[in-house]
Image (spheres, helix red, strand yellow):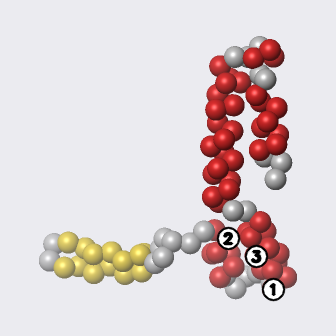
Amino acid sequence: MKLESKVKVGSKEIKKYDAPRSPCQCLLESEVLSHGVKAELTWLCGLYNPVQLQHNVNKAVPALREAVACPAPSCRKGTSGLKLLFSK
């Protein structure tokens, strides 16, 4: 978020910021990239769904905690599912 304006009212300063943007959006709006690179970046950004990524992380955390809590190989029954979670 960039600062757009600062207005002093009495002893206070009122700051106005622009809308938040992801680094991908900032790159796409810049003029330094060619059209081909912008098209590839748009395609790459479309591959990742933040909600699905968060869901996968939330499902993997209990298995990771269990693996750390019990270092013996016999305790790691459920960790084989981690490969399935992050294979997409």
The image position of residue 11, as x and y in percent, is 16, 72
User: Which residue does the numbered mark 1 point to in the structure image?
Assistant: 35
Q: Quadrant of residue 67?
A: top right
The image position of residue 8, as x and y in percent, is 23, 79
SS at mark 1 in the image: helix
Q: Which residue occupies the extreme left position in the image? A: 10
Q: Amino acid at mark 2?
A: Cys
SS at mark 3 in the image: helix
Q: Cβ–Cβ below 8 Å for labels 2 and 3?
A: no
Image point 19% across, 79% down: which residue? Answer: 9
Say if 45 sits above or below 50 in the image. below
**Neighbours of disc 3 within 10 Å: few (<14), some (14-19), many (20+):** some
In primary-sequence order, the first of circles 1 and 3 is 1
In primary-sequence order, the first of circles 2 and 1 is 2
Say if 52 sits above or below 73 in the image. below
User: Which residue does the numbered mark 3 point to in the structure image?
Assistant: 42
**Neighbours of disc 1 within 10 Å: few (<14), some (14-19), many (20+):** few
Question: 87 left or right of 1?
Answer: right
Q: Quadrant of residue 25?
A: bottom right
In primary-sequence order, the first of circles 2 and 3 is 2
User: Which residue does the numbered mark 2 point to in the structure image?
Assistant: 24
SS at mark 2 in the image: helix
Q: Nearer the viewer, residue 7 or 59?
A: 59
Q: Label 2 vs label 1: CA separation?
A: 14 Å
Q: Amino acid at mark 3?
A: Thr
